[in-house]
Image (cartoon, rainbow, N blue to C red):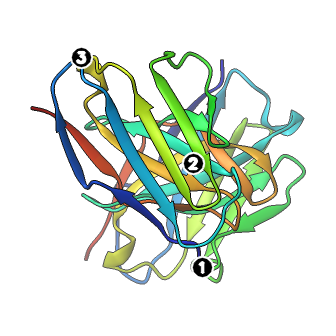
Amino acid sequence: EIVLTQSPATLSLFPGERATLSCRASQSVSIYLAWYQQKPGQAPRLLIHDASNRATGIPARFSGSGSGTDFTLTISSLEPEDFAVYYCQQRSNWSTFGQGTRLEIK
Amino acid sequence: QVQLQESGPGLVKPSETLSLTCAVSGYSIGSGYYWGWIRQPPGKGLEWIGHVYHSGSTYYNPSLKSRVAISLDTSKNQFSLKLSSVTAADTAVYYCARPLGDYVRVWFDPWGQGTLVTVSS
């Protein structure tokens, strides 16, 4: 099973700041990595698939990068609605998710 | 626009079978795509359970494969999850979602709102 490790566990930032979230895979997943946003009491929402492809309707401030074992989700300038939990998911070998990064308002 | 909505009992007894249904609107499930299930224990991360292709082919998480069955009901435009021999460890919010991609190499979009299933006597 491919294990995804997300860091940091919690990230505290001000609105307007840049957020950088990391996801590291225990073995190469090529570009087969997706990112999701989950707000309290809601289902996850797809942000990015295949490392860098924004899903339909996702604002341009969200971007993804990386390949192999190291991936990054960047939010260029945080809006109040961006504070949530973010999960990465690999689809290279079956499907597994990271444990999540909580992005909170500082 | 595809929309999904889960339904089913919120409480299941240990050793019994958990049964959930996902109603799909905005698309005829027999026409294409995969249709799947993911769960999230309270306060924890996400776990892929499995999915079914519109042809009926199924793909299951190896850790759950012996207990899981996912099937389509095209006449009602819905698909179902059955998880047998449940224990407290199966307590979770269960989401239905549409997998995109190929075979087991999928990502998920969109998702249903989720339904909490508690396993307790």
Of the pair B45 and B1, the residue shown nearer to us:
B45
Q: Which mark is residue A16?
A: 3
On what subunit does the disc labeled 3 rest? A
Seen at 58% across and 72% down, the residue is A2
Q: Which mark is residue B57?
A: none
Q: Secondary structure at mark 1?
A: loop
Q: Quadrant of the C terminus of chain B?
A: bottom left
**Which amino acid does the dot numbered 2 rest on?**
Thr
Q: Which of the two marks, 1 or 3, is nearer to us in this view?
A: 3
Q: Secondary structure at mark 3?
A: loop
Q: Position of residue B21 (x, y in %)?
A: 57, 48
Q: CA distance from mark 1 to mark 3?
A: 47 Å
Q: Which mark is residue B67?
A: 1
Judge whether B47 appears above or below B64 on screen: above
Seen at 31% across and 77% down, the residue is B88
**Which amino acid does the dot numbered 3 rest on?**
Gly
**Which amino acid does the dot numbered 1 rest on?**
Arg
Q: Is residue B110 visible?
A: no
Q: Is residue B68 left or right of residue B85?
A: right
Q: Is residue A33 visible?
A: yes
Residue designated by label 2: B21
Seen at 88% across and 34% down, the residue is B31
Q: Is residue B82 left or right of residue A106?
A: right
- How dense is the environment of label 2, judged by Cα within 10 Å: few (below 14), some, or many (20 and up)? many
- How dense is the environment of label 1, judged by Cα within 10 Å: few (below 14), some, or many (20 and up)? few
Q: Is residue A69 left or right of residue A44?
A: right
Q: Which of the two marks, 2 or 1, is nearer to us in this view?
A: 1
On what subunit does the disc labeled 1 rest? B
